[in-house]
Amino acid sequence: MTSVTYHDVRFLEPAKTRNYLNVDYGAFSWLFTKDHKRIGILYMFSISIMFILGGFFAMMMRLELLTPEGDLLTSDTYNKFFTLHGIIMIFFFLIPSIPAVLGNFILPIQLGAKDLAFPKLNLLSWYLYMIGAFVGLLVIILGGVDTGWTFYTPFSTQYSNMHVFGTTFGAFIVGFSSILTGLNFIVTIHRMRAPGLTWFRLPLFVWAMYATSLVQLLATPVLAITLVMLMIERVVHVGIFDPALGGDPLLYQHMFWFYSHPAVYIMILPAMGVASEVVAAFTRKKIFGYKFVAFSSLAIAFLGFLVWAHHMFVAGISVYSAMIFSFLSYFVAVPSAIKVFNWTATLYKGSVSWQTPMLYILGFIGLFTMGGVTGLFLAALGLDVHVTDTYFVVAHFHYIMVGGAVMAYFAGIHYWWPKITGRMYPEWWARLSALLVFAGFNLTFFPQFVLGYVGMPRRYHAYAPEFQVLNVMSTAGASILALGYALPLAYLLWSLRFGRKAGVNPWGAVGLEWTTNSPPPKDNFHETPVVTWDAYDYPAMLKAMGETQNV
Amino acid sequence: MADEHRNEHAAPHHITPLTTYIFVFVARAAGTLLTWFASTVDLGWMNTPIALVIATTKAALVILTWVVVIGSFVWLGVLFVLTFADYLTRFWAIY
């Protein structure tokens, strides 16, 4: 085995070899591919359609809320739209977004592996996703569902006359896609690291994906069995959650949130992994406190399992257990704060460059911090009573899920786009998009903090006139946000044909993915890499570059 | 293919034989039928304990066959202990 050293590969020009995109042609070569990179692209295409669909429902809601009267949508249609927006964005976009797209594409390359451990299982997970998504789309065509994305009982089991069974069945199927992806990643990280790539030389994106995969593997089966029980009770009236049949509706909430709170970490942990990669690359520094950041991912994954009942403080749970869950919810802020402090410390005296991925990640750090801090408001037992089921909660979780996870997804897409496609995107347009997204996001969701705090409840299509000014601001922000999201769709497609060729390492970044061609060959590397350097060893790289220039 | 350069430091892993899968599947299917049969017979105060014994036996089959016991019990323990922390301390009089 020939070793390709860190210093050799950085200056390689892309060899004129076949890559994963042109090694084979035709629809079947994509639909039956076992190549992790092509499967990542399939996911990217699929979830983008879901993002557009979920965005459509969001825009319709915001347009309805432009005026206090319910003049655009009826209350029933509004109920369906916020339900479908939530289900599509959470189950069909956010949960698979970074893991299934960027994780699939980048993780094996970062490990120096040829593929994931189980390539066929990887393809199966995409098919399961597509079947689940198809069931979900069928439900929309047949008339939709109005339970909210949480499917709370007894409304979902007894009273709703919409397509609850079909929707939960779709979410059930998609859950298995998530489980198989997590399983694949864990085995791959344990068994297929390149020679020399020890645990503490792994990129922090890999650590984040490892923690995410643990949550996917341990939490998703609980959602699956919960949804099965819901379907059983709805269809054959076995008493599980219905008090009239001897069940308990709060049992549903316990089991649902045992998955769905950790599911937030399925969304945000990979985002944190992207943030670590981008911050290091665009400051030219080692991540401050590498081991703390790595272990904080595992700590978040673990503590994330202990806090679910903070979603149930006003639902009638025991006040004693509520106190425990409140305390534990505060506790989960510690590892999250460690990450934020360490990224900030990495920025300090760094050689910061303002490329698009960095703009998105700087936005991510600020918005995630806002979302996290307002989460502490909700963890406080007294304050939670005041703001539960108001727009304060809506604003809080959008700061985490959109301001956090979606910003990082866009950062990751821009950061690895040259590697994925071999082409550069137009930087000016991309920077404009990042700024529009940041501005539009804050204009959309910051007013909702105020709305919620002064008492506007969520999930109503009409509201009191005194809330209108803030709602108009929010809808205006949503329009800017939509433009910010539409721009990348246009210029990324444009770049596929007209973008400048990227070369092996357009960012001058470290990491195995930047040592292979762009786009990578089918087996990722022409020779198995041997890793002899630490993660984010930018000081050594800068030194080596200086020496080369001197020669 | 993908495992050509698997990490040589990784621990060896155990592969469960197919016969074990079949045995556990058949045993658990039988347990399900037994649960259904038991539900058709009125055994008084024994109804719930018998259903729980069958369910626990079925769960034990899975756990003893595949699950890495300590780690998984910690995780399942979290679900059970914190859920029962609610149920056992709830002020039921208001319901």
Image: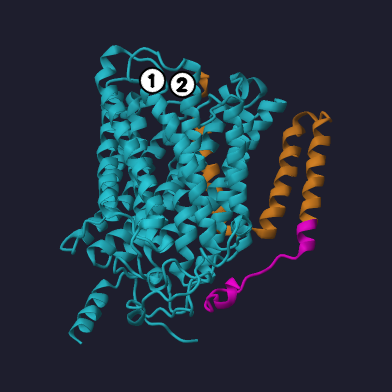
The chain carrying label 2 is: A
Task: Report the residue marked by disc 1.
Answer: A64
> Which quarter of the figure has residue A230?
top right
Above or below, B16 relative to A454: below
Position in image of residue A145 (x %, y %): 56, 26
Disc 1: CA contacts within 10 A as few (<14), some (14-19) or many (>=20): many
Position in image of residue B73 (x %, y %): 57, 53
Task: Report the residue marked by disc 2.
Answer: A78
- Which amino acid is tagged 2? Tyr
Position in image of residue A497 (x %, y %): 40, 57
The chain carrying label 1 is: A
User: Which chain is rendered orange in the image?
Assistant: B
Verify CB contact (< 8 Å) between mark 2 and mark 1: yes
Position in image of residue A157 (x %, y %): 62, 25
- Which amino acid is tagged 1? Glu
The answer to which of A457 and B70 lies nearer the viewer is: A457
Q: Residue furthest left?
A: A349
Asked if residue A527 can be seen in this view, the reply is yes
Q: Colour of chain A?
A: cyan
Q: In the drawing, does residue A345 fall left or right of residue B77?
A: left
Under tag 2, what secondary structure?
helix
The answer to which of A255 and A124 lies nearer the viewer is: A124
Q: Which mark is residue A333?
A: none
Residue range in magenta is B1-22
Residue at 54% from the left image edge and 74% from the top image edge: B10
Q: In the drawing, does residue A481 fall left or right of residue A87?
A: left
Under tag 1, what secondary structure?
helix
Above or below, A103 relative to A463: below
